[in-house]
Image: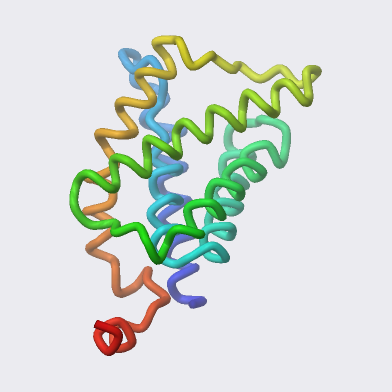
Amino acid sequence: MTKSLLISTLILFCTTIIESTILSNISFLLVVPDLVLICSIYFSTLNGKLYGETSGFISGLFLDFITGVPLGLNCFYRTLIGYIFGLFSETIIISGVFMPMLTVSVGTIAKRLFLILLSLLFPKINLEIYSFISYQFLFEFIVNTLLAPLVFRFLGFFYNSLSIKDTKDMIDNV
């Protein structure tokens, strides 16, 4: 488990750097696609709720340090999202095209709901929250949904290094 957690942490760190340095500087993008969220959802559905919590917290911590938002904001909702998707790790099949798109679209909506809830609970924190009915949210929703199968497929190349499940046990249960 330690090896897979280190590899997933490295992947989350790299996607955080790509998201905050390269994608944020592309001028025609309305909103930066959330590659870190897509990776966290992949890790959660692959390995379960404890792993999902951990990867969500680590990704939130990276984003909190890089983006300069109040410390713990991204950690909070990304930990919750990781836990929720980790609950369904036994029932969600992460291969194919439809299920990655569905899980990431639900994750993007959950992210927006958590951010709106946090902005209502802590009104003094100036969060640039846009509503569900906006071009920014629609753009982020569509781009995250379309990128999900590609990112899941790419991370699938590292399945043996990322999975904490024993493939022998999976074959015996079939």
**As drawn, is 88 to the left or to the right of 79?**
left
Which quadrant holds residue 58?
bottom right
List the single residue furthest toward the top: 134
Q: Which quadrant would the C terminus be assigned to in this image?
A: bottom left
**As drawn, is 110 to the left or to the right of 161?**
right
**Residue lying at 71% horizontally and 41% vertically, measured from the top left:** 72
The image position of residue 75, as x and y in percent, is: 64, 45
The image position of residue 144, as x and y in percent, is: 34, 33
Which quadrant holds residue 119?
top right
**Where 36 falls versus 92 (above or below)?**
above
The image position of residue 96, as x and y in percent, is: 19, 52
Of the pair 50 and 91, the residue shown nearer to us: 91
**Residue lying at 59% horizontally and 17% vertically, measured from the top left:** 129
**Where 150 falls versus 115 (above or below)?**
below
**Where 109 falls versus 9 (above or below)?**
above
Of the pair 11 and 101, the residue shown nearer to us: 101
